[in-house]
Image: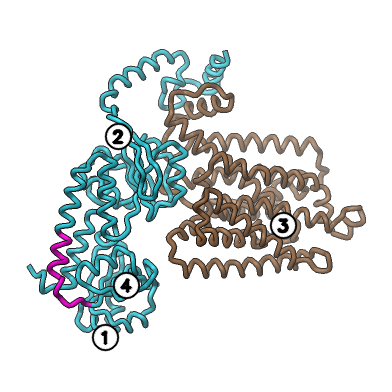
Chain colours: A cyan, B brown
Amino acid sequence: MIDSFFDFFLTLALPHGRGRGRTAFSHPGGKGRGCLLMLCMLILFAPSLSYSSTLRLKDEVGREVVFPFPPKRIVSLAPNITEILFCLGLDEEVVGVSIHCNYPEKVKSRVRVGSYISIDFERVISLKPDLILATGAGNPKEVVERFNTLGFPTYVIFPKRFDGVLQSIRHIGQVVGKEKDALRVIESMNQRRERIVHLTGGLSRPKVFLQVGDSPIVTVGRGSFGDDLIRLAGGENVAGREREMYPRLGREDILKRSPEVILISSMNPNGDYERIFREWERWKMIPAVKQGRIHLINSDLIDRPSPRIIDGLEEMARLLHPETFKK
Amino acid sequence: MRILTLKKVIAVSLLLTLFLGWVILISVMVGSVRVDPRQSLSILLRYVLSLKPTEHEMEETIILSLRLPRALLAGLVGAGLSVSGTIFQALLRNPLADPYILGVSSGSAVGAIIALLLGLSAYSFGLPLASFAGALITIALVFYFGRQGGRVHPNILLLAGVITGSFLSAIIMFFLSISQKEELHTIIFWLMGDFSFANPRSLIIILPYFGVGFSMLYWKSRQLNLILSGEENALQLGVEVERLKILSYLCASLITAASVSLCGLIGFVGLIIPHAARLLFGPDHRLLLPASALIGASFLIACDSLARTILAPVELPVGVITAAFGGPFFIYLLRRRKVVKTL
């Protein structure tokens, strides 16, 4: 009774053709047809939406996550997660990515769901994801909690240091049902790392200053990916004893530590590196400046905990020990 | 000046309520995901009449769990800030006064930062509770500093508030510059105002502050009018001026504290809406209070709808929109008023 009154009200309130898309529901009297249509759609899509089971796992921050396995519609909230997913051979499954995701090329065609912090929840919901992947280093807890209350399973990774990246790749492999591929990726990354460590083992370790921010000058301290890479690539981080992950150092302090190589991370694509280079040129007493060993390094390769971090390691080793890696 | 009748108050309130309802409807219909307007309306009506839900699960989540709570929260905060701005302007006799002028916002920001540094934000209400506590302490301190000889002097209260606020801002800057915690980035977003985490619980938290505060203030609105015509005058007419000032200070501050601790700093609303309402409906608080509450609610909901749609998927801080649209509109109101006067 109320129902039909309600439909009647709707017809009064909104004359036909006013709303652009006519849905099965809002069309009075079209309800039966709507149901039939739904049924047909269900039958049509049933095979493609069948999951073999549900999976219950603890994520990297200790939350329990339950989700259909293997997930078929995944939203990634961070660029390193997106890279890992594509690296494991997923493609169609990645339906939404963050605005920071710029690799591989294919992400260009995916729906953008927001930045690390400001997420367009509507858009995520409209993608009907069966799993959301987030990172503890970037996505605020509130975002994860929000998805939880909205009923979307969210798996959080939180890689720390180089080995943490390998672990996160393995975990994501488990979560998306690509464990074998994950192990293969990890194996090859391990081999490439061993090679670098082996080749740089007996060499002298140059003092390295890795600049990740300009005005104020920010570098990498203990526990950061950059610090790990410098050590693995056979260098010594001049800020390696700083307790902060990303300490701010004054120019004086850097002069005193007299780095032999200065690496400038390309924090943003339109960065004014010429100016930063020139700024360093003024300090001839720094060994790195005297010997002209100031280099630019792609920041996506060194501060993004993704499979490409191994490329960053090799690049860094080349810059620190050019004579060893000439060919 | 024409005499204000109850009829006029009711008529204006009703009209503005209708307008508010319309704004809420529009706000629920727009977003980064297109939902058919008819469908939005039917989902909404079914929810209000508590009929059985439709089969459109996705659209329902978007409308009922995201857009509706958000619009309602923005409305409550907009109404609260406007009412509290109206009161502060009257209490301090200063047209520049806004809800944050007495340092409530800085106090609650300090509370939030301390909660983040101590890791209290891990608990689901740690952050809003801590920032509310910070705001309460600030309210008490400013009140203590601003009272002399048992009397509240508007100018001394104003100075005490501004100085306390700057002192607390220094503390905020200090923490922001020395801390390495990534979580402090959330503080920056929070300082810009954020409705994206609106849910029914936040509505339930903020409603009593606004409800009780507004009722108290409205109950005293006739006396507030008398105070504006001069304290001596009001005293002679039997108004307990000091008690009234304390009451209005507390009500306005508590409303502000509740909204800041939940949604952060949303500028401009509390400054311009009271002026706009005053220009439109005159200075009588019996009409001014409900009018600015309703206009403030509609204004903030509209601004928030814009903030979350124009650059989607990225959301703009709502303060950017309130300032961008509120400023010119306010100038227009000022100019028009001038023209009317010179005629």
**Label 3 crowd bin: few (<14), some (14–19), many (20+), radius 10 Å:** many
Residue type at tag 1: Lys
**Residue, disc 4:** A240
Whether residue B221 is situated above or below residue B143 in the rendered picture: above
Q: Are dots 1 and 2 in contact, CB under 8 Å?
A: no
Please provide the residue range marked out in magenta.
A192-206
- What amino acid is labelled 2 in the image? Phe
Q: Nearer the viewer, mark 1 or mark 2?
A: 2
| Circle 3: residue type | Gln
Main secondary structure along the magenta-highlighted residues? helix
Q: Chain of mark 1?
A: A
Disc nearest the viewer among 3 and 1: 1
Dot 1 falls on a residue whose secondary structure is loop
Q: Is residue A120 above or below residue A261?
A: above
Q: For mark 3, name the chain.
A: B
How far from the left and from the top, in percent, is residue B11?
73, 35
Q: Which label was assigned to residue A69?
A: 2
In the rendered image, residues at marks 2 and 3 fall on the same chain: no
Q: Earlier in the sequence, mark 4 or mark 2?
A: 2
Would you say residue A38 sits in the magenta stretch? no
Name the one closer to the observer, A187 or B50.
A187
User: Which of pointers 2 and 3 indicates the residue nearer the eye?
Assistant: 2
Residue position marked by numbered label 1 in the rendering:
A284
Whether labels 4 and 2 share one chain:
yes
User: Residue visible at 65% across and 54% down?
Assistant: B334
Q: CA distance from mark 2 to mark 3?
A: 59 Å
Q: Which subunit holds the residue at mark 2? A: A
Name the residue located 55 percent from the left edge and 34 percent from the top edge.
B25
Query: Identity of the amino acid at label 4?
Result: Gly
**Residue denoted by label 3:** B89
In this picture, residue B313 sits left or right of residue B90: left
Residue B296 visible (yes or no): no
